[in-house]
Amino acid sequence: MAGFGENLLLAIGMLADPQLLVVIFLAAVFGLFVGAIPGLTATMATALLVPVTFFMPPLAAVSAIVACTAMAITAGDIPGCLIRMPGTPASAAYTDETYAMTRRGLAAQALGSSLVSSVIGGLVGAVVLIVAAPILAGFALRFSSFEYFWLAVIGLSCAALVSSSDLLRGLVALLLGLFLSTVGMDGVTGTPRFDFGVTELLGGLNFIPIMIGMFAVSEILKHLASDAAGVRVQALPQAVGRVFAGVWSLIGRYRRNVARGAATGTLIGVLPGAGGDLGAWVSYAMARRFSRTPEKFGTGHPEGVIEAGAANNAALSGAWVPALVFGIPGDAVTAIAVGVLVMKGLNPGPQLFESQAPTLYAIYLVFLLANLALLPLGWLAIRLATPLLRIPRHQLSAVVLLCCVVGAFAINNTTFDIGVMLVAGLVAFALDRLGVPIGPIILGLVLGPMVERNFLTSMVIADGRFIGFFERPLAAVLGVAAFVIWTLVLARPLWMRRRRRA
Amino acid sequence: MRARRAERAFGAVLAVTGVVIARASAALPSIPAQAYGPGFFPMWVGIALAACGVLLAGRTWWAAAGPPVSPGPAASSPRVIPSWRGVLGIAWLVLGLGAVALWLEVVGFLLCMPVFMLGYLWLAGEPVRRSVLTTAVSMAVVYWGFAKWLKVPLPLGWLEGLF
């Protein structure tokens, strides 16, 4: 096995490919564009990008996803700040604050400070990924199917718990995803399941058309239903001035917030199912909680914007730690990325760190590069924000729908997947109306085969005894942890009710 | 009241779906000489889904005196009645994409998609000239990018032989 220096040199060599750099640049511009359009999320940008990555080499495909999501999350701040319409759910956490800054004539400061803190947060998250992932991977080499089963159960549990304010709805979403993962021939015995005699379903449901439908088609349906699709920006409140003027001193003044936001974001990112959206909300709340001037929050105060900005980009990198080490995605974007890695023959797991070390090092470097590139590209996006926000929404939706159709078709070159995409879009639209989160469905769909395969393998090894799942010390710890999580979750409402009565 | 009814109906649909999944899974053959097989995992998923459905529907009765527990954001928000353009847009999107899925191979990508896009933009009340321009440019870019550059065999249908 090559050493650190050799792997790093190989990775730099891989990254020096001009074609790869062009791919990263184009994906970043695409991410900036999608993120800056209100209502189009970072997940949607990734979903639309995946069909194109299908035709790329593995490193270029992963790099494109990394660059695109980092840019989309950051660009989501622009419409939130200028017209009070957050570009991504993560930006929604501090949209009112940035918009209040805009009304005070501080739009450039709001966007500049958010951009710089995002870059710092993203870099911290990337460094944690670079340091923590190989250590965890070395540890994970000792894992058997028992440990993987419990890890997947804990991951799925967290996804259900944190994805929605309502546990039951999160759980429903997760179970629907797990059910969808069982469609097609069973991986162990080859028995067809839930195929309804449709030949195309024998191979299982491809997650890409489902994802495009759930994140892109349903979003357009949502806009049409809420009649918000016709919203056009007539005039921006003010032109954005010098983006970085006074920002560095502001970042220096709130350096603790940057550090806390980056740490919180990374930790939340590592938690399966949470991701950048939750990271931004939690960090903004924490900034207010620990602020010396909490009364200034909501009046156009940059403290919370800086902390939450650092958190959402740090969470993006953090989410890749469990995805690369265990194949357990941290959020919907990394769930898509895990699918792409598998599609490219780079099965996530500790073995990946031995067999594909140079590629992994190159991915790490892409994280650093993408976050550094945020500065010039983010600056450019802010300067171009005015014409970007004037694009009529319906024209954009029509083009997105065209990309959806081609993207769904291109995976297997079959129109059946266009139908799957449409059905997935309708289901997601209906579920959204009922308050059911969509993220856990994708996590369930991606993690389902892993849970089932490891469960059946473990059952065979344990000769059908469930106690066998607790016989290895590490498996026992993880199993007990899973039970403790669920016991606490289920016992809490009963305890609260008893306390209220008392 | 509306939120509670929606929650009840949703819970009932989930419960029935869960039972159907569990029953269908239980009917699958098990691994020889083992008590479990390909039906084991989906059976438990079905049972859990049915339980969630019962809990969702049930908690609306338990909390009958007060508001429903944690209603979904859409269910609890005031009813938004989409404009007729919105309704037509949804109908066109659903039926149009369904038609594209059915006839793309026969009619061809270059005929199907412009009709779908122009219809969508016309129903949305977009200016004709701008809509034609958007459709023409995006079709050219997407067709060139995917069919010519990435070699995706986008069906030509009736135009087969012309390109």
Image (cartoon, grey):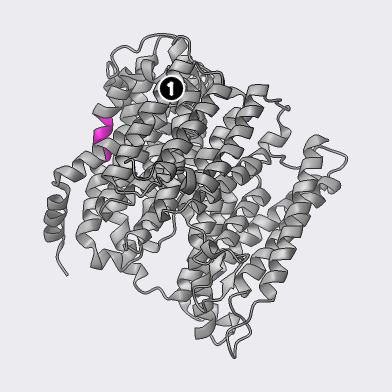
- Residue A235 relative to residue A321: left or right: right
Q: Position of residue A491 (x, y in %)?
A: 70, 57
Instruction: Report the residue at 24% width, 36% height from top.
Output: A25
Q: In the rendered view, does A91 fall on the left or right side of B79?
A: left
Q: Which residue is mark 1?
A: B132
Q: Residue furthest front?
A: B161
Q: Amino acid at mark 1?
A: Val
Q: Position of residue A194 (x, y in %)?
A: 62, 66
Q: Is residue A356 left or right of residue B112?
A: left
What residue do we see at 46% from left, 41% from top? A404
Classify B18 as above or below B62: below
Q: Residue at x 69, y 53 (%)?
A: A492
Is A129 above or below relative to A35?
below
What is the x, y in percent for residue A211? 49, 48
Label 1 neighbour load within 10 Å: few <14, some 14-19, many 20+: some
Q: Magenta stretch?
A: A370-375
The residue lying toward the viewer, choosing from A208 and A334, is A208
**Chain of the residue under the numbered disc 1 shown in the image:** B
